[in-house]
Amino acid sequence: MNRRDFLLTTGAAVLAPYSMSASAQQVLTAQPVKAQILPAGDPMTQMLGFNGSTPGPTLRTKQGELFDIRFDNQIDQGSAVHWHGLRIENAMDGVPGMTQPMVEPGGAFTYRFRAPDAGTYWYHSHNRSSEQVARGLYGPLIVEETTPPDVDHDLIVMIDDWRLSEDGVLFGDFENLHDQAHSGRLGNFARALVEPETPVKRGDRVRLRLINVATDRIFPVEIAGIDGKIVALDGMPLNAPQDVAELVLAPAQRVDILADIAAEDRISFVFPTRGGPYELGEIPVAGENTTRSPTPIPALPANRTATPDLSDPVRLTLTMEGGAMSQRMRQGLMSEGIWAFNGQSGMTDTPLHRFERGQTAVIRMVNDTRFPHGIHLHGHHFHELDPDGALGALRDTSLINPGQSQDIACVFDNPGKWLMHCHMLGHQAAGMKTWVEVT
Ligand SMILES: [Cu+2]
């Protein structure tokens, strides 16, 4: 393997984010930062970040409590902050031109909301996001349960990739058409950033909050050294904990794991690639916890969500089209946008559908392309439906592989205008987006 294609990480990598607790108003400032993306000793990278670091600070709030944060834009482009996965009021969703005005350079915007759902979320720029997220404008957002599960450590594991030169310079060309028509902008260097950076003991019980913050890359992840279960997907608790097997995170997806530390020296996060296993990062294990007696992994308390009424739902189809090797490209429709939903590339004046508040819809998402897509709906969670039509897990982002389709059931109960787009941000930039309205 080429060292620069597959640089190995030697420790749990941290870019020094810090925590802020939610009580009085906080400030989140987007600004240029220098970050140690490559291993320590290699050159630093000029990035964008929040409050001096990328990823930005870990934001924590308690379920149902007022979250009050002023976003200051100190970069040289317009921006706004989207609180990914939070079912909050439309005006706080952070989509410039749709839910709020653009926050121009030097400008500010105050976000105030109560997060209804406990779980693992994240925040990121939602303007020119294929560029601004790639340049570092994102961070974790944790909504704490009223009664959190009993763990010794609560650890956030952000998985990202970057496209860097030998000397640590982030490549530009964020609108590269070849990338957009294929799998998006894939980095040549990837890491799992663990926050906080702290050793754990064998026998500790930990909560791992995995977040794929990459703009375009799907990460399969193998975790060695733990004995645990998946307890939540995209922030939403599973009815029953599931075995940790074949973890795959599309961009923006999250997985919560409760686990007991089985390893004596380290927990490792490995990205299996065609070129071999690629080490994303690790958490050192030192010493032994002898006081904790083994108990089964509990389910997390459910968040309050409406149950879809499947007796007579609105039925829609959303067909993904376009990209390299597609009919759409052969027909020369690239100038109208590389990617499309139902033949339409980019935003339209009228929504894909207008829902009456509380209506259940079953949407068949059909991937008629040669590439996987991770489709994200703003302001709502939806159930993925099993092949037999039963309600599966709640998600806010669903991964659909080429040639596959996935039915989702959603209760559209949050009023407003909501984006629905591919979270491969290069695909979104090249037209794979639409919107719905709930009135
Ligand atoms: Cu896509």
Image (spheres, rainbow, N blue to C red):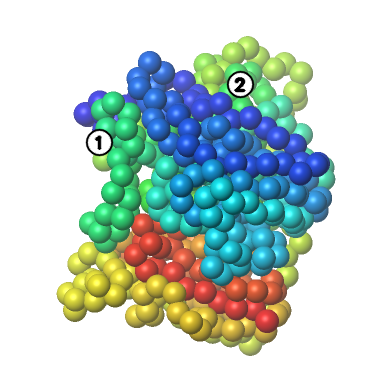
**Which residue is the extreme one toward the bottom?**
312
Which residue corresponds to the image point at 38% horizontal and 16% vertical from the top-left?
41
- 281 relative position to 5: left or right: right
Q: Quadrant of residue 149?
A: top right
* Label 1 residue near ligand 1, CB within 8 Å: no
Which residue corresponds to the image point at 70% horizontal and 47% vertical from the top-left?
69
Residue type at numbered disc 2: Thr
> Can you identify the residue that label 2 sits on?
198
**Which residue is the extreme one toward the front?**
106
Q: Quadrant of residue 58?
A: top right
The numbered mark, 1 or 2, whose residue comes first in the sequence reads 2
Residue 368 in the image: above or below residue 210: below
Where disc 1 sits, the SS reads: loop
* Label 2 residue near ligand 1, CB within 8 Å: no
Residue type at numbered disc 1: Gly
Is residue 370 visible to us here? yes
Query: Dot 1 surroundings within 10 Å: few (below 14), some, or many (20 or more)?
Result: few
Instruction: Using the image, tell me which numbered label, if any, was put on residue 115.
Output: none
Residue 95 location (% of width, % of height): 56, 62
Circle 1/circle 2 CB separation < 8 Å: no
Where disc 2 sits, the SS reads: loop
Query: Dot 2 surroundings within 10 Å: few (below 14), some, or many (20 or more)?
Result: few
Instruction: Using the image, tell me which numbered label, if any, was put on residue 275.
Output: 1
The residues tagged by marks 1 and 2 sit, at their Cα atoms, a distance apart of 30 Å
Q: Quadrant of the C terminus?
A: bottom right
Residue 150 location (% of width, % of height): 76, 34
Is residue 403 visible to us here? no
Residue 352 location (% of width, % of height): 50, 81
- 406 relative position to 370: left or right: right
Q: Quadrant of the N terminus?
A: top left
Residue 289 in the image: above or below residue 379: above
